[in-house]
Amino acid sequence: MPVEILMPELSPTMTEGAVASWLKSVGDAVEAGEVIAEIETDKATVEYRAAANGTLAKILVEAGTEGVAVHQPIALLVEQGERPDAVSARSDMPPPPTRRERPLASPLARKIAAQSGIDLAAVKGSGPNGRIVKRDVVGAVAPVAPPPPRAPAPEPAREEAGEAALAHDPVPHSAVRKVIARRLSEAKRDIPHFYLSIDCRIDALLALRAELNARPGADYRLSVNDFVLRAVATAMRRVPNVNASWTEDAIRVRRGVDVSVAVAIEGGLITPVIRDADRKGLATLSNEARELAARARERKLSPEEYEGGGFTVSNLGMYGIREFAAIINPPQSCILAVGAGEQRPVVTDGALGVATVMTCTLSADHRVVDGAIGAEFLAIFKGLIEDPLSMLL
């Protein structure tokens, strides 16, 4: 009897997905655990592995189909030895999904195509699994000759001018943007945020970073953010109350120190998690963070790699942002916003001087973290950042 292959539920927030590609064709033998398709969620592209042996008898959802509901049948598998074409004659087989099929494309590519009047169906994608990305659409835009000069148009009537001011270019919501909008709205509405900022001098950190990166044979390339992650993980271990979540029955303090790192991806944001970050050295943290960020931008993370963190670090220093306050990533209770290190005037023992200063702002859930707890965490964090050798002990 044919077995239904269903659209998987790859995360608690997933309600629908897209079939990015089929790696097996109708009639191909399939072994349990073998990758047969790639499923695109709101956060990543995930390999779909078969749960049983058999033969792929029928594909119900073609590659490139978006908006397929979780648990909806996407293909049929028959036992080995059973004829795949037998399922087409059965009257009790589920019908193909009625969702509208669209070319597989990134949200930015869709926006550019809509603004330029380009039919995505006529564009060949160069991204993963034939996904249409920005460069494909930009390359399809033909240069337009400038129009001939003409006499100035008469000034529009007041009503026409008002209508022109309301003109806009609609950009359809991507799945990523929908999830981000919902979660941020819920977080800002339901979580009582409060904010604490602290200035950290990082000249000693920069000197140590340069020394470590210059070591012969080093298989790492440390960044300032790697030291931030190490300091956050160490401070979380010493102040466990920041590594907690609010529930209606209790405050749940996490046992493991798992740090989420905010990574910008095309059309949104994702927070891959570094597990047991307090037990890892700088080089390991650096390499793991870089590898996770690279796969996040390729949308290749598995759900367990971006869910379950206890604290988030968001760093906009590389963009020249001096300081900012971030929105908490529920169910976590804290997020640290890290600004750029810049030279500022400072006073040391009554004498005016110059130091490289980095401003960090902690956003905390006041139901879980009181002001004194947040201040204690930041004091420990600052001490580690300004004395970076201590975080190596």
Image: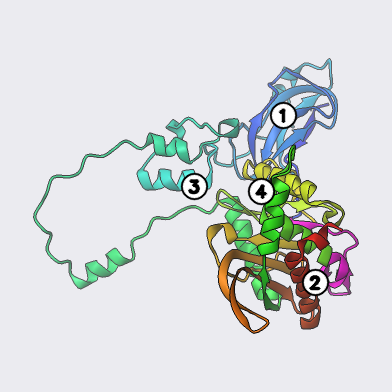
Q: Earlier in the sequence, mark 3 or mark 1?
A: 1
Tag shown at residue 203: none
The amino acid sitting under disc 2 is: Ile
Q: Relative to residue 75, is residue 109 depicted above or below?
A: below
Residue 13, position in %: x, y? 72, 55
* Mark 3 vs mark 4, CA separation in Å: 15 Å
The residue tagged with tag 1: helix, strand or loop? loop
| Residue indicated by mark 2 | 380
Segment colored magenta: 236-260
The amino acid sitting under disc 4 is: Lys
Q: Earlier in the sequence, mark 2 or mark 1?
A: 1
Number of callouts in the render? 4
**Residue 383 figure quarter:** bottom right
Q: Which of the two residues, 318 or 253, is positioned nearer the viewer here?
A: 318
The amino acid sitting under disc 3 is: Leu
Nearest to the eye among marks 3 and 1: give it. Answer: 3
Nearest to the eye among marks 4 and 2: give it. Answer: 2
Q: Determine contact: label 3, label 1, CB under 8 Å.
A: no
Q: Residue furthest right?
A: 255
Residue plotted at (75% across, 46% down): 288
Residue plotted at (62% across, 59% down): 180
The 10 Å Cα crowd at callout 3, few under 14, some 14 to 19, many 20 or more, is some
| Residue indicated by mark 3 | 108
